[in-house]
Image (cartoon, rainbow, N blue to C red):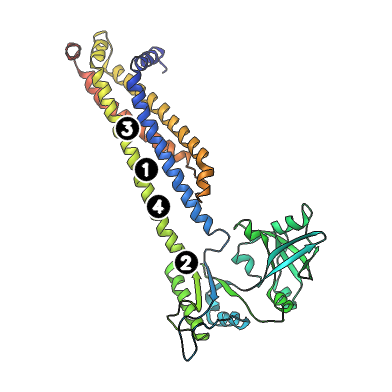
Amino acid sequence: MFDLDRWREIFQAISKNKLRTVLTGFTIAFAILLFTLLFGIGNGLKNSFAEMFAGDANNAIYVRSWKTTKPYKGLQVGRRIQFKNDDYKFIVDEFGDDIQYLTSLYTKFVKAIYKNETSNYQLRGSHPDIQFLEELVVEKGRFFSEFDLKKKAKVIVIGRLVEKDLFGRRSALNKYISLDGFNYKVIGVFSDPGGDNDERYIYTPLSTLQGMYGNTDYINNLRLTFRPTMSNSEAIAFGKKIKKKFQEKHQVAPRDQSGIIIQNMAEANQAVGAVMFGLTVGILIIGLGTLIAGIIGVSNIMVFVVKERTKELGIRKALGATPKSIVGMIIQETILITAIAGYSGLLAGTAILRFIKPTLEEYKIIDPSVSDVLVIGATITLILSGLLAGYLPAKRAARIKPIEALNAG
């Protein structure tokens, strides 16, 4: 039941003891403020790691080639390894059962023209599976198919920003764009979670692009995803097996790290997982340390406050106050101060995070924020600790005889 007289007494006690009220509140507010900032920045770092791998499948493997750095079987150093269409067939024959999606990739930088609008883009020749490997989202029309690939259809799927550059607010669907003098029909428009750069690509069937530029069978690289059911260790072993087979096919020395290059997302995930775990543990330890420091501070202040008020409590008992009412008053006062200070610390912490957010994002710390549930939980923990810290000495003080309390003053 709400007791107006009790609350008047509490506010009178607070107004008479401004310094200790401010010290108690500052200890709590500062602990919650630090807690909010630490977890907010920590979450921003986690978001940064997630952003680094946005737009690509988490189970992807990239197979690239470069120049050899070691002689092998009479072949000289510096030999350029060139992938061709038969490498796509080779990987299907060798590893087909363990592959989810697979594509070859052949790229050209082209000049795109639509009416009076002109710009330069990367044109990517690939298989239809690139849609899933790059996690493209078709917003309009469709992606090209295996049928388009077989027929060498002169069709393209363009990024959302390509459409915006060349067509403004108009739809590009079913329009024709000139790419290096060749006309292609736009059959789809896509968005990409990877961001602006990835939305300025143009995709066309691999066979079409190879036919347009010298009827070549060259490809730049191969991309695939392994079976999602593979464990991380199995996926890493799978990537090493692919590298070994390609080194054998292209006669690259087993210890040559340059001729055949494998980028396995399983290895990246393992490394990122270890970093994220260490980051989480570090933030948790620092956050808990800050919280414990706040709890100790509140506890020490409350012990001192109750001891300081021994005479006052003795007078209250002499005037007829029950031990229960004395304990209840101190607990209510503690909860009030802790709740207000904790909420103030939360508001200050979130305000500072919003203020420094642009600066942090310049250093690639993305969207630094903290869950309200987490901070409210920390505040409740401080309130409970303050309650306990106030309850124990208040209970002892409430037992003291009025004459002893008066003599203690």
Residue 319 as seen in the image, left or right of residue 36: left
Q: Is residue 127 above or below residue 312?
A: below
224 or 36: which is nearer to us? Answer: 36
**Residue of label 1:** 287
Residue 76 appears in the rendering = yes
**Upstream in sequence: badge 4 or badge 3:** 4
Q: Nearer the viewer, residue 335 or 176?
A: 176
Contact flag, marks 4 and 3 (Cβ < 8 Å): no
Instruction: Find disc 4 in the rendering and name its residue.
Output: 279
Whether tag 2 and tag 4 are in contact, CB under 8 A, the answer is no
Which is in the foreground here, disc 3 or disc 2?
A: 2
Would you say the residues marked 2 and 1 are in contact, meaning their CB atoms lie under 8 Å apart? no
* Distance CA(mark 4)–CA(mark 3): 27 Å
- Which mark is first along the chain, 1 or 4? 4
Q: Secondary structure at mark 4?
A: helix
Q: Quadrant of residue 223?
A: bottom right
Residue wearing tag 3: 385
Q: Earlier in the sequence, mark 2 or mark 1?
A: 2
Q: Tell which circle, 2 or 4, labels the residue nearer the N-terminal end.
A: 2
Query: Which secondary structure, mark 1?
Result: helix
Q: How many residues crowd around disc 3 within 10 Å: few (fewer than 14), some, or many (20 or more)?
A: many
The residue positioned 55% from the left and 64% from the top of the image is 57
Q: Position of residue 290 (x, y in %)?
A: 34, 39
Q: In the rendered structure, which amino acid carries the disc numbered 4? A: Leu
Residue tagged 2: 266
Sequence-wise first label, 1 or 3: 1
Question: What's the amino acid at mark 2?
Answer: Ala
Q: CA distance from mark 3 to mark 2?
A: 44 Å
Cα–Cα gap, marks 4 and 1: 12 Å
Give how far across and how far down residue 216 sits, in percent: 68, 81
Query: In the image, what residue type sits under mark 3?
Result: Ser
Extreme-bottom residue of the structure: 74
